[in-house]
Image (cartoon, helix red, strand yellow):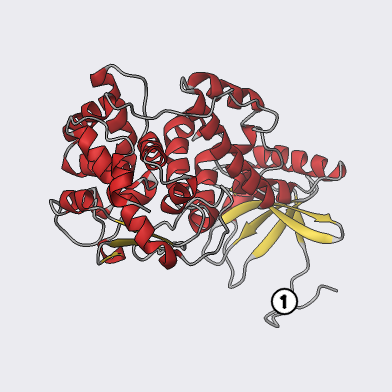
């Protein structure tokens, strides 16, 4: 005897007949949804909703539980096609498959672009301080080719092809790392089962040692003006402070007090501050030359505020490339400006420890936790000395060598 419905209404005995299109068309809706089973094809039924909407369902059992597989709307699929589709579903069940689960997985896996967006919003922005740089690589080099592909269809051959297309070896390596991070996250989330980036060889690269020479320095200083006030001043600030380009581009006015710029180690999302690379709060003196440059910039919040309340972070590298092209010199990057500052510090005789303290390094034998304020006087002396040395070169004066170090003392 049929069981009662969940709402307490008595259940009808199963309705069965050899379905045909005319019979299905004439079915009238009832106060409750009901099924009419097809006696010709096992598992096939037409479901009629109280609204009058009719759809084909394939109903089977998997591990003792009923599964409802939606075949399609009656208005779009004929009885003959519904039987063919149901036959395929039931064949899969006979092979031990669960077609409903397979269909959900197929629908949920999505394209690579959708997966990359989920990774960005659900993981990268919360845990990766340099997410913006990685996302820019993904949007530029991966989405145009892979964006519309199903994530599970991307193969190792596709990854190798990407590595070949990108001319710059370092950029190709960085893009490979960004793609691998997305797939590794997707595996943990159950979106994919394979990371096609694994076993793909990185391009061989050499550690960069580029430092602007005494002759190049005034040429670059003048070329920075072609990049515009904001970008040009940011590049000059990197050169005069030795801080990381991404941190300089996110400099906040409220972090500058009495000539000291404090870089909070932790991100401050409400301010758009990404945090320092090593998560250690850092405090650096802004030399007089830097303060003079920053005085030309107006506004609140970001010192180097770009369009739509953002920063000029992504404009720094193109500006350096443009300067190198104009001057006809070896490629130099914004980070090479930081390296040039560090070299100036050691060149003036202040030592590697002083350079590490100024550049917020944790290597070189420096403890991970120390009282930075106890080095305030030293940092101030070193920063002013290095800035004076660099400005002298930028303005065409002769290199000062150790004279500045002797003047300021230690």
Question: Residue 384: horizontal and vertical position, in percent?
Answer: 28, 50
Element type where label 1 sits in the image: loop
Residue at coordinates 77% horizontally, 40% vertically from top-left?
87
Task: Evaluate whether residue 256 shows in this view.
Answer: yes
Task: Evaluate whether residue 71 shows in this view.
Answer: no
Question: Residue 71: horizontal and vertical position, in percent?
Answer: 65, 47
Residue at coordinates 42% horizontally, 41% vertically from top-left?
346
**The quarter of the displayed image where residue 388 is located:** top left
Nearer to us in this view, 203 or 402: 402
Nearer to us in this view, 78 or 261: 261
Q: Is residue 30 left or right of residue 337?
A: right
Q: In this view, does 328 lie to the left or right of 193?
A: left
Identify residue for label 1: 5
Residue at coordinates 51% horizontally, 54% vertically from top-left?
278
Image: 260 above or below 228: below
**The quarter of the displayed image where residue 367 is located:** bottom right
Question: Residue 3: horizontal and vertical position, in percent?
Answer: 80, 75
Quarter containing the N terminus: bottom right
Quarter containing the C terminus: bottom left
Image: 245 above or below 126: above
Give the residue furthest to the bottom: 8
**The quarter of the displayed image where residue 255 is located:** bottom left
Nearer to us in this view, 311 or 13: 311
């Amino acid at each position: 005897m049929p069981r009662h419905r969940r709402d307490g209404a008595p259940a009808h005995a199963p309705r069965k007949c050899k379905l045909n299109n005319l019979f299905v068309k004439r079915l009238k809706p009832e106060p409750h949804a009901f099924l009419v089973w097809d006696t010709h094809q096992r598992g096939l039924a037409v479901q009629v909703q109280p609204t009058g909407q009719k759809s084909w369902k394939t109903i089977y059992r998997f591990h003792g539980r009923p599964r409802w597989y939606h075949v399609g709307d009656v208005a779009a699929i004929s009885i003959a096609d519904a039987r063919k589709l149901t036959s395929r579903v039931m064949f899969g069940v006979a092979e031990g498959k669960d077609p409903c689960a397979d269909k959900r997985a197929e629908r949920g896996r999505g394209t690579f672009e959708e997966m990359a967006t989920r990774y960005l919003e659900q993981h990268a922005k919360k845990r990766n301080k340099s997410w913006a740089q990685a996302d820019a690589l993904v949007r530029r080099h991966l989405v145009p080719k892979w964006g519309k592909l199903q994530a599970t269809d991307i193969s190792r051959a596709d990854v190798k092809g990407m590595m070949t297309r990108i001319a710059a070896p370092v950029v190709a390596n960085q893009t490979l790392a960004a793609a691998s991070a997305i797939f590794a996250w997707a595996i943990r989330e159950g979106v994919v089962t394979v990371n096609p980036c694994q076993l793909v060889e990185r391009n061989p690269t050499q550690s960069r040692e580029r430092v602007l020479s005494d002759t190049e320095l005034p040429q670059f200083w003048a070329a920075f003006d072609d990049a515009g006030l904001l970008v040009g001043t940011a590049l000059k600030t990197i050169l005069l402070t030795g801080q990381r380009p991404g941190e300089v581009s996110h400099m906040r006015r409220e972090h500058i007090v009495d000539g000291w710029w404090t870089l909070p180690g932790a991100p401050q999302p409400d301010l758009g501050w990404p945090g320092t690379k090593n998560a250690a709060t850092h405090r650096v003196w802004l030399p007089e030359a830097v303060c003079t440059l920053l005085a030309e910039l107006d506004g609140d919040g970001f010192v180097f505020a770009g369009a739509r309340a953002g920063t000029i972070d992504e404009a720094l590298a193109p500006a350096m490339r443009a300067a190198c092209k104009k001057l006809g010199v070896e490629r130099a990057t914004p980070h090479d400006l930081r390296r040039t500052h560090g070299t100036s510090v050691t060149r003036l005789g202040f030592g590697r420890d002083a350079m590490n303290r100024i550049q917020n390094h944790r290597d070189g034998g420096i403890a991970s936790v120390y009282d930075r304020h106890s080095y305030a006087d030293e940092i101030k002396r070193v920063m002013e000395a290095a800035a004076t040395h660099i400005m002298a070169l930028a303005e065409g004066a002769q290199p000062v060598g150790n004279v500045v170090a002797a003047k300021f003392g230690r």
